[in-house]
Amino acid sequence: MSPKILVVEDEPSIAENVVYSLEADGFTVLTASTGRAALALMEAHEIHLVVLDVGLPDMTGFEVCQAIRKTRTLPILFLTARSSEVDRVVGLEIGGDDYVVKPFSPRELVARVRAILRRVTNAPVNAAAATTPLLIDDVRCLAIYFGTALTLSRYEFRMLKAMASHPGRVFSREQLMDASSEEPDASMERTIDTHVKTLRSRMRGVRDGIDPIVTHRGIGYSLLETWPEVSA
């Protein structure tokens, strides 16, 4: 069964182009032109990813994202005519996985959707992975924690990959920002704490009782160097 994508966009011409491109690439697509209609479809269908316009007639895309995040962790890609730094930061801070600024190439959007879905697919893992605390699969862009593939945004995956490359090493927020973003800037640094909080939540959901990320106040973060005894 092909992944089901929900496209939330109130401009018919843009919605049609997005739907056509996604369906041509093999996806099943549902559409909504308002935030409330989108939330209703979320309740009625199993959605794998949301393409979400920021400027909707009844509520903002940010508000829709916050409503979705109360109950679900599925990936969200923002569509926005706003290229301002503030909007990009807000979108990432409230749980967005990526964003595309209008006007955009439908081909680029489809490529980003595919990349996000590759990261969050619960790929099968082998027996060795189930007894190893953390494995980073670069080929599939997956972080496998105690045998479970974590659902992470690309920024969270890259941050975790950086820390996992040197367990015990303290990374500053600036270093983590550089490792996670293609276009790092000073304003993005304050989102690092939000991403770390999300990483901890995802990892505790797999193995409660272990805090894998250590906070070094005033300095940054590190991944555990010595893990508690691993049991099946």
Image: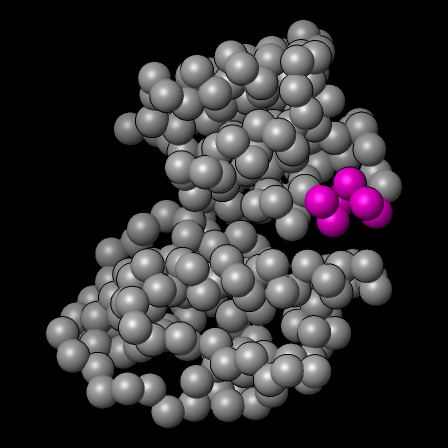
Identified at 51% across, 18% down, the residue is: 38
Identified at 68% across, 42% down, the residue is: 91
Left or right: residue 62 compared with residue 43: right
User: 158 or 40: which is nearer to us?
Assistant: 40
Give residue 144's quadrant in the image.
bottom left
Left or right: residue 187 compared with residue 171: right
Residue 19 is one of the magenta-drawn residues: no
User: 20 or 201: which is nearer to us?
Assistant: 201
Check the image and name the residue furthest to the front: 217
Q: Quadrant of the N terminus?
A: top left
| Part of the protein shown in magenta | 85-90
Residue 198 place in picture, x, y as percent = 50, 58
Residue 78 place in picture, x, y as percent = 65, 34
**Image position of 196 with respect to 37: above or below:** below
Identified at 81% across, 45% down, the residue is: 86
Residue 21 place in picture, x, y as percent = 58, 22
**Image position of 39 with respect to 125: above or below:** above
